């Protein structure tokens, strides 16, 4: 399945672990961007390090071997390097902004930038999660995927889901790089109302969510085109190339040129 379909920028390690992405079912698509599973058989002492960029979403990764399974929750609002221990089997859920709050009932405001065992968080459905973790080690890969998807679907029936209009607005604004004030105007609400609702529903301010979308669009352009930095800057809503470079470096810890050179090098030297 193509990463582009999920608006995901492929990491350099994707080919090496034979990663397969799986679209969420209709009941989950509003809150889950995708699931992924590493299909290549695990190798002992094989660790993959990847640079992760903040985009407002969160991940829940099931780490499984013959002795047991754990559910690792990770939300980050800054660039971080994450290490995958590929001696174990991984199935990961990538939530859209607000998805973890809606489906898992978690307040993510105090758990930024650190991986945490979901069993150690105030998750309201621990008994169901424990049963799932006890079952996963004895299942095949296909059965594991099915069990996790069923568990997620069950959560949608219990979740206190926010009004669909706010998630639809966020999806439209992110895809089209609509600035916060314009998004408020489109919805016919005040900027203060937009601020309050997006923080409540998705855990981020309108400015943060817009900034994440700008950087994601810019990263795609840097990797997939030879467009000039000045053109990318204007198309992604920055005042000029200097503004773009400063904002990009602040969020990714490298300049746009450095990012482009690194990603092109990964593509040409898989």
Image (tube, rainbow, N blue to C red):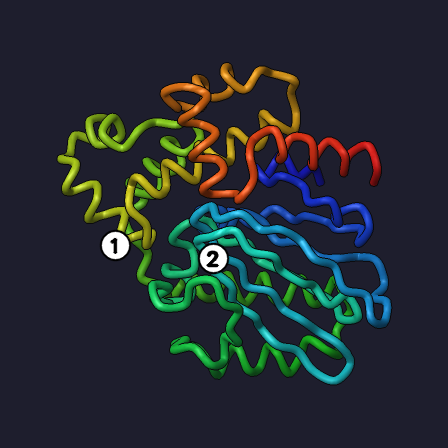
Which residue does the numbered mark 1 point to in the structure image?
Answer: 200
What is the quadrant of the C terminus in the image?
A: top right
Q: On the rendered structure, is 92 left or right of 241?
A: right
Residue 214, disc: none
Q: On the rendered structure, is 35 left or right of 178?
A: right
Q: Helix, strand or loop at disc 1?
A: helix
Mark 2, Cα crowd under 10 Å, few <14 / some 14-19 / many 20+, is: many
Residue 149 falls in image quadrant? bottom right
Q: Helix, strand or loop at disc 2?
A: loop
What is the quadrant of the N terminus in the image?
A: top right
- Choose mark 1 or mark 2, whichever is in front: 2
Say if mark 1 contacts mark 2, CB within 8 Å: no
> As displayed, is residue 163 above or below residue 58?
above
The tally of labels here is 2
Residue at 53 percent of width and 47 percent of height? 53
Residue 84's x, y, as percent? 69, 63
Q: Nearer the viewer, residue 7 or 130?
A: 7
Please report whichever mark, 1 or 2, sits nearer to the chain's N-terminal start.
2
Structural distance between the alpha carbons of marks 1 and 2: 18 Å
Q: Nearer the viewer, residue 128 or 183?
A: 183
Residue at 36 percent of width and 67 percent of height? 105
Q: Nearer the viewer, residue 150 or 123?
A: 123
Mark 1, Cα crowd under 10 Å, few <14 / some 14-19 / many 20+, is: some
Residue 99's x, y, as percent? 42, 55
Residue 102's x, y, as percent? 37, 59
Residue 186's x, y, as percent? 23, 26
Which residue does the numbered mark 2 point to in the structure image?
Answer: 76
> As displayed, is residue 111 above or below residue 238?
below
Residue at 31 percent of width and 61 percent of height? 160
Residue at 78 percent of width and 81 percent of height? 66
């Amino acid at each position: 399945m193509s990463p582009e379909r999920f608006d995901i920028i492929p990491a350099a390690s994707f080919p090496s672990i034979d990663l397969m992405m799986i679209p969420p079912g209709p009941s989950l698509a509003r809150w889950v961007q995708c699931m992924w599973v590493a299909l290549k058989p695990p190798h002992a002492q094989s660790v993959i390090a990847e640079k992760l960029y903040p985009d407002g979403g969160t991940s829940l990764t099931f780490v499984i071997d013959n002795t047991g399974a754990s559910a690792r929750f990770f939300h980050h609002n800054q660039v971080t390097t994450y290490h995958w221990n590929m001696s174990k089997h991984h199935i990961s859920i990538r939530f859209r902004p607000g998805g973890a709050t809606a489906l898992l009932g978690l307040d993510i405001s105090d758990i930024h930038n650190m991986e945490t065992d979901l069993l150690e968080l105030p998750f309201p459905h621990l008994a169901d999660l424990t049963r799932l973790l006890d079952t996963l080690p004895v299942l095949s890969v296909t059965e594991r995927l099915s069990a996790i998807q069923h568990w997620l679907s069950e959560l949608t029936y219990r979740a206190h889901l926010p009004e669909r209009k706010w998630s639809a607005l966020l999806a439209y604004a992110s895809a089209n790089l609509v600035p916060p004030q314009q998004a408020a105007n489109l919805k016919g609400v005040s900027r203060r109302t937009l601020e309050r609702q997006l923080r409540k529903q998705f855990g981020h301010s309108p400015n943060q969510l817009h900034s994440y979308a700008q950087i994601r669009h810019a990263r795609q352009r840097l990797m997939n085109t030879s467009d000039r930095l000045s053109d990318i800057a204007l198309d992604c809503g920055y005042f000029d190339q200097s503004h773009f470079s400063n904002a990009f470096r602040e969020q990714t810890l490298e300049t746009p040129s450095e990012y482009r050179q690194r990603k092109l090098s990964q593509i040409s030297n898989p």
